[in-house]
Structure formats: structure tokens, C-alpha cells
Image (spheres, rainbow, N blue to C red):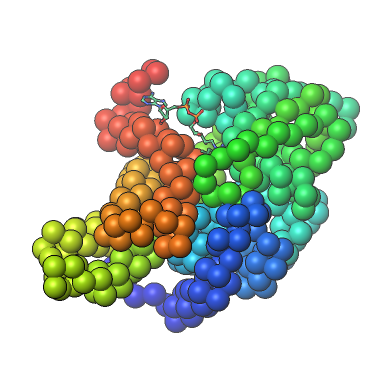
Amino acid sequence: MQFELTDEERAFQDAVRRFGDRVLRPNERRIDGQGRIPDEVIAGMAELGLLAMPVPSEYGGMGASAVLTELAAEEVGRGDSSMATAVFFLLEAGWGRIFARYGTEEAKREVLPAVCRGRAFLGIATTEPTGGSDLAHLRTTSRKSADGFTVRGEKAFLSGVEEARRMGGGHLTLTRAEEGGFRFLYVPTNGPGRSTQRFENMGRMGISTGAITYTDAPVPAHYLIGADGEGFGRAMEGFTVARTFVSAACVGAAERALETGMRHIKERTVFGRPLGKFEGIQFELADLYAQLEAVKWQCRRAAWLIDTYLDRGGAAQRSEIERTVAAVKLTAPPLAFECVKRVMMWFGAAGYTKDVGLELGLRGVTSYLVGAEGGLNVMRMILGRELLGREFLPYK
Ligand SMILES: Cc1cc2nc3c(=O)[nH]c(=O)nc-3n(C[C@H](O)[C@H](O)[C@H](O)COP(=O)(O)OP(=O)(O)OC[C@H]3O[C@@H](n4cnc5c(N)ncnc54)[C@H](O)[C@@H]3O)c2cc1C
């Protein structure tokens, strides 16, 4: 067992933390207020290699391991606690990895360099107005055409719809193939047969959420991701990776909240002594810290398992990956929410103000409680399936 980060990992972690301190924190209120991540922030992320970082260098990325990406996700979540930048980061990291592994050579050369330079957005489109948990029953269809595919249906609650329109780019889109099975396609957002709608969210305002309607939208043949008919497995693989990075971003946001809280309870004096001297507060900090350390290391282990076994492990290792990732996605968002909420209470009335800024984190982290990258009960279902067997899935 080796828990020490390598020199390279430590150096990159430090660099991303500095970027978080110098660029993300000073901009997070602006990101939230103006409803988009400023171009110079995205350019800074690109310069540091943070955009779609698992993509191999021949397509513009840095070929980062899941562990290195996880470390970066922690720092991005710590830097912009609204989570908008973290979402931008982790979608491109998780789905860029899938694109690079299963996309055609032509599509990778065409799309990925622009994504890695911050000139195009890459996201995921699985959820539909009729639901996001029960993906086996999704309704958006695709069929073969003379020069590729046509897509018909509607996807909803997609992150980055406006970004993909504005910057160019699109979403890896899971469809039901009329010829049988599931087809995973890269669908650029701009083009004939697409219309978009933006939803008004309560948090992570710097990245849009919206819907795309496809009315016989043409998609070139070379935008097929993976083998035709086997798109479901590719999408699930992407979720396994992306959920690890989501959890890492939650860890970063939670650590930042606790650091803010610790500074406060050392300084704030009530009843003649610092708040931190009271057991009621100190023990709360201890409990949160203990839980957070456990989740952080479980999250890093999930990334390590992905690097070590996702491609070459047998059934036992794949099950271990599924269990570990589901467990961190089940625990990291609620714990981050709890950390931010508790620290808010340590601040008393000031915690409720925008000046202290904890509300940004509370609104941002909530997106991962309600469902983004899979609801908490879906994580429980995965754990139930892996612990008890597939026959215990509720819909079997
Ligand atoms: C801010 C935000 C950004 C998002 N970005 C994207 C994106 O980029 N791309 C994308 O495709 N989707 C995205 N989503 C959608 C997300 O993937 C879905 O919210 C999620 O999959 C849950 O689907 P749903 O919202 O339709 O809820 P439903 O599937 O209707 O589920 C509702 C609730 O019931 C629970 N539940 C479901 N099944 C069961 C069961 N069998 N037993 C008990 N409980 C159950 C769920 O956990 C959930 O809490 C985003 C969501 C949010 C909030």
C-alpha cells in the first residue's frame, strides 16, 4: 500500500491549488453573478492543462491518470465553491476520457484539441424529461441514414447547453438505436434539427443547464462512440469515472468550508472565549473532519482502482470499482453539504450573508444531492446490486 503522492502529483496539486487561490476564488462571485465562467478563467484552465486532462497528448490533452484528475478536481472544487467550474472541469475530464478511448480517429482529431484548448465544450446527454435514473427506458432514438445517423427526441437537465452553443462543441448522447441496442453519439449542439432551452437553476449559476430537442437531427457517421448498439456500457463507464471526479470536487468544497470555519471559530469570541473552545463546536469539527478524511481517501482509492483495473480487471475488480465509486458518490455530496451547512451555523447570522459566501457552496453542492451524475438512491441501488446480486435490482 502506498499513500504517498508522487512528486509529479504533488507538484500538479500545488499548481492547481495556486490557480484556485489566484484565479477561481477571486472570480467565484462573478461566475455566479454573470451566469458564465469568464473566458480568461477557461483560458487559464486550458493553459494549466486542466481541460479534458485525461485526453492523450496527441489530441491536445495531457493524458492524465484518474488519480491526477481526482486531485485536480479536489482543488477546482475548493477554488470555486459554487461548483460551476468544477462541473465544467469534470464533465470534460470524464467524458473527454470516453471520447478519447472510444471515438473514431477522425472525430478525436476534429473535436478534442478544441475542447482541450477551451474553444469547445464537451458534456453528457443521457437524462430526458421523463427521467434520468431509469436510463434503460430512455426514449430518444437514432437511426442509420445515408451518411450517418439521425436523432429524434429530447434530452433535459443537461449541463453546458449554452456553453456548447456559444463556444461550439456538444454532448455525448445516449440514444436507443432503431436497429437495436443503444447508440452513443457525439452530437454537436449547433446544427440543423436541434433547438435548445435554458433552465433557471438555484445554484452553480456559472454553467448552464438546459434541454435539447432533436428533430431528425443529422449526425455524421464518424461521431459514433464505441461499437454500434453497445452505447449503454460506454455511458456507464463514463459515469463511473465522472462520479469519482464529482465526489472529489465535493471533497474540495467541504475542505474549504471547514478551513473557513476553523479560522472563524478561532477568532470569534462569545461568552468570553473563542467559539472553538466550546465542545459543542469543537466536537462537531472533529466529527466532520474524521468523515471527510475517510471520504477523501476513499475517493482517491476509487481513482486508483480506475487507473489500475478499469481496463484490465476481472469481474471482482469491476465490482470493487462499482462499489467504491457508488459509495463515494453516495457519501461525498451529503457530507460536503453538511460541512457547508454546519460552518454556516458557526458563523451565525453572518453565515446567511453573501459576504461570507457559504451560500454559494450550499447551492452548488445541492445539485449533487438532487441528482447530477446520478441520484443518491441510484448509488444505493448500485451498491445493493453489487453486494446482493443483480437479482436484487428492484426492476428485475
Ligand atoms: C444541476 C444538474 C445538472 C445536470 N446535468 C446533467 C447532464 O449534464 N447530463 C445529463 O444527462 N443529466 C444531467 N442531470 C440530470 C441528472 O443526471 C438526473 O437528475 C439524475 O439522473 C436523476 O434523474 P431525474 O432528475 O430525472 O430523477 P428521477 O429519475 O425521476 O428520480 C427522482 C428521485 O427518485 C430517486 N429514485 C430513482 N429511482 C429510484 C428507485 N428505484 N428507488 C428509490 N428511489 C429512486 C432518484 O435518486 C431521485 O432522487 C443534471 C441534473 C442536475 C440537477
Q: Is residue 320 visible?
A: no
Q: Is residue 327 visible?
A: yes
Who's the residue at 30% across and 73% down the image? Answer: 263
Classify residue 384 by image quadrant. Answer: top left
Q: Is residue 170 left or right of residue 389?
A: right
At which x and y percent is residue 132?
52, 29
Residue lying at the far right of the rendered structure = 146
Who's the residue at 24% across and 74% down the image? Answer: 266
Q: Nearer the viewer, residue 221 or 189?
A: 189
Residue lying at the far left of the rendered structure = 279
Counting every numbered tag in the picture gives 0
Whether 8 is drawn above or below 368: the answer is below
Identify the image quadrant of the C terminus.
top left
Q: Nearer the viewer, residue 62 or 350?
A: 350
Who's the residue at 76% across and 40% down the image? Answer: 189
Q: Is residue 229 left or right of residue 358?
A: right
Q: Nearer the viewer, residue 279 or 93?
A: 279
Q: Nearer the viewer, residue 148 or 329?
A: 329
Who's the residue at 73% across and 28% down the image? Answer: 213
At which x and y percent is residue 235?
56, 39
Classify residue 221 by image quadrant. Answer: top right
Q: Is residue 148 left or right of residue 117?
A: right
At which x and y percent is residue 275?
19, 67
Classify residue 251 by image quadrant. Answer: bottom left
Identify the image quadrant of the N terminus.
bottom left
